[in-house]
């Protein structure tokens, strides 16, 4: 408790010193799934965001470094006014609080997703990827393995046996092979409605990009169109994906012989890798980090997993395994240890 009070006092003192205003205050703007938090302040008619990123838990340097790459390519990320990297405080542009999540509906989806896919194409075409950590087989597999531990093991209280692990391992190999078969590009890794802001100029504003890697070209598109927080009719999603495939061919980011079926497999199975990971992450956020609200979105993510995996015969064993343990359960309800 004292540490939190001390940090709040240090955060406020730093902000007042940077802006030269001993009267300003800070109000919570948002928190994310990490140790990072965001605070809004007002000074001389302008709104600012203070990012609090405790260096021991969330080093702010990757956020700055990736943000500079995106900005250099013409993407709208928060401009940085001041930093104190030793304390983990950054004063940055306030992009507002109008998340895509709250703005998306049947009337706005075409326009908002159009802007997002314009930005995504620019990211994949123009952002410098020199030195980015690869989204390689080992990294992808570590993510997949979060699901058996936290979703099956902790949330459903099921200890998988050797046969079940073999089923999951075989399914994971299909997903890994699919991801690694794709062209590599800059991958935001959380390019979705909670990290895109509706803004007046250069829409969208892009945040939470510090985990970027060099990885499969379908990943961010799947994050956007098969969002863990919002779902659309599958025919509409596939239409958007097909339009994007044509643009990737036009800009020579994928070969002209990557047909609709091949690209849809990339898209489906890359999204499936992500959703299997998220089943585990949302449970880990609940039980390890005390953020039980993420369980509210678990049924949607589970439905994505079953709907997509059911379309691929080589994943039938995984579907059967999951359905056997989920049937009749309310995934939104936490379980005691």
Image (cartoon, rainbow, N blue to C red):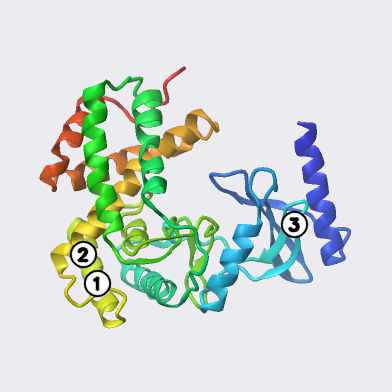
Q: CA distance from mark 3 to mark 1?
A: 40 Å
Q: Reply above or below: 166 against 7.
A: above
Q: Reply above or below: 247 against 282.
A: below
Confirm whether residue 281 shows in the render.
Answer: yes
Using residue 192 as the reference point, say whether residue 310 is left or right of it.
Answer: left
Residue 276 in the image: state x and y as whole percent: 32, 41
> Which secondary structure, mark 1?
helix
Q: Mark 2, residues whose alpha carbon is within 10 Å: few (<14), some, or many (≥20)?
A: some
Residue 149 in the image: state x and y as whole percent: 39, 29
Q: Reply above or below: 158 against 253.
A: above
Using residue 330 as the reference point, say whether residue 204 is left or right of it.
Answer: right
Viewer-proximal residue among 197 and 241: 241
The residue positioned 56% from the left and 60% from the top of the image is: 97
Residue 72 sits in quarter: bottom right
Query: What residue is shown with label 3?
Result: 85
Query: What residue is shown with label 2?
Result: 263
Seen as rendered, the residue at the extreme bottom is 250
> Which secondary structure, mark 2?
helix
Whichever of callouts 3 and 2 sits on the residue coming sooner in the sequence is 3
Q: CA distance from mark 3 to mark 2?
A: 42 Å
């Amino acid at each position: 408790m004292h540490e939190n009070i001390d940090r709040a006092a240090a955060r406020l003192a730093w902000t007042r010193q940077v802006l030269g205003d001993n009267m300003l205050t800070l109000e919570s703007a948002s928190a994310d799934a990490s140790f990072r938090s965001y605070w809004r302040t007002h000074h001389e008619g302008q709104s600012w965001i203070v990012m609090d990123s405790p260096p021991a838990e969330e080093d702010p340097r990757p956020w700055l470094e990736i943000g500079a790459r995106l900005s250099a390519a013409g993407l709208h990320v928060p401009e940085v006014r001041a930093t104190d990297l030793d304390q983990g405080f950054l004063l940055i542009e306030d992009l507002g609080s109008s998340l895509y999540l709250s703005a998306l509906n049947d009337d706005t989806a075409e326009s908002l997703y159009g802007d997002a896919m314009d930005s995504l194409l620019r990211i994949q075409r123009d952002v410098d990827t020199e030195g980015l950590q690869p989204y390689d087989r080992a990294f992808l597999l570590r993510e997949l393995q979060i699901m058996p531990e936290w979703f099956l093991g902790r949330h459903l209280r099921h200890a998988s046996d050797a046969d079940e692990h073999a089923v999951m391992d075989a399914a994971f190999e299909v997903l890994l092979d699919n991801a690694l078969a794709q062209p590599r590009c800059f991958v935001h890794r959380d390019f979705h409605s909670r990290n895109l802001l509706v803004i007046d100029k250069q829409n969208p504003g892009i945040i939470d990009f510090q985990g970027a890697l060099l990885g499969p070209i379908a990943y961010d598109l799947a994050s956007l169109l098969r969002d863990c927080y919002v779902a659309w009719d599958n025919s509409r999603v596939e239409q958007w994906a097909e339009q994007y495939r044509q643009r990737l061919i036009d800009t020579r980011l994928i070969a002209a012989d990557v047909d609709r079926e091949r690209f849809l497999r990339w898209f489906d199975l890359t999204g499936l890798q992500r959703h299997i990971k998220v089943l585990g992450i949302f449970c880990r956020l609940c039980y390890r980090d005390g953020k039980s609200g993420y369980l509210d979105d678990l049924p949607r993510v589970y439905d994505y997993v079953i709907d997509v995996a059911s379309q691929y015969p080589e994943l039938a064993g995984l579907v059967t395994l999951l359905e056997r343990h989920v049937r009749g359960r309310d995934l939104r309800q936490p379980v005691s240890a």
